Amino acid sequence: MVYIMSKCKKCGVFIGDQSKVCPLCHMVLTAEEGDNPSKRYPNITKKRKMWTRIWKLTTFILLLVQIILIALNAIFYHGIRWSLTSGVVILYLLVSLYQLILHPDSPVRKLFWQTVWVCLLLVGIDVALGFRGWSLVIGMPCVILSLDAIVLVCMIIQFRYWQNYLLLQMFALLISIFCVGLWYLQRNPYGVLAWVTLGVTGFFFAFCVCFGSTKAKNELQRRFYI
């Protein structure tokens, strides 16, 4: 028997539910005839609903905890400064859980968003504690150096597709330039750390572009339509 089903041309699988995009690669699906059950992706609607309920319950509990913390902070310490710090941490946990269980992405996108959320988390904690700037002059360079190390490991593990991480390297390079810019504007007393971060990130990116010329060029052309 032949059925009209949604198919992902990239993954080569038929989708068993009413999804508009492929659950594996997020490519837009097309309607095609299919009769091979071995290449069908299972119906994930029920499982997704279960995870959605879990995430909503977790959100409710964490928000309740945050309200209690704000109340305790206001009653016993005549302010809500330290409870703002817990609020930033709770927000980071909720966003991370959402991305992990409800919005599955490629490893590159996950690394990008986790880097963004960690930077925002550090800035949020810094602001809650009076904003002394350590999140920008120390926190961000350390995050970028950590990202460089993680990307290097991922590129070694996924050597055949290392070029997929070029955009992530460019993002790290932009943040490194921002950190050096703060030093140039005399807003960053830790210039050595900023320059080390820029040097490591820039060398890493330049090495990949120079020695992976064909793949790097094709990836940049595909991403920027040049």
Image (tube, rainbow, N blue to C red):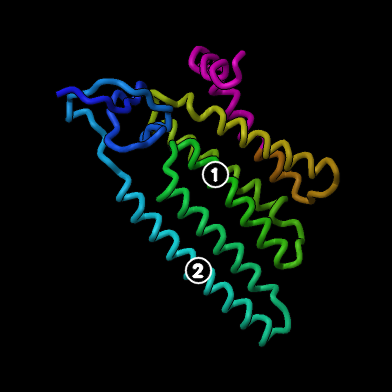
Circle 1 residue: 113
In this picture, residue 155 sits left or right of residue 39: right
Q: Residue at x 30, y 50 (%)?
A: 46
Q: Residue, x 31% and y 50% (percent of image)? A: 47
The stretch of residues the image draws in magenta is 198-226
Residue 194 in picture, x, y percent from top left: 71, 43
In the image, residue 168 above or below residue 219 = below
As shown in the figure, which amino acid type bears the numbered disc 2?
Answer: Leu
User: Is 108 left, or right, of 169 in this rendering?
Assistant: left
Kind of residue at disc 1: Trp
Whether residue 111 is situated above or below residue 222 in the rendered picture = below
Q: Position of residue 28 (x, y in %)?
A: 43, 27
Observer-nearest residue: 79 or 40? 40
Q: Measuring 68% from the left and 82% from the top, which residue is drawn there?
A: 74
Cα distance between the residues tagged 1 and 2: 21 Å
Query: Mark 2 = which residue?
Result: 62
**Residue lying furthest left in this view?**
1
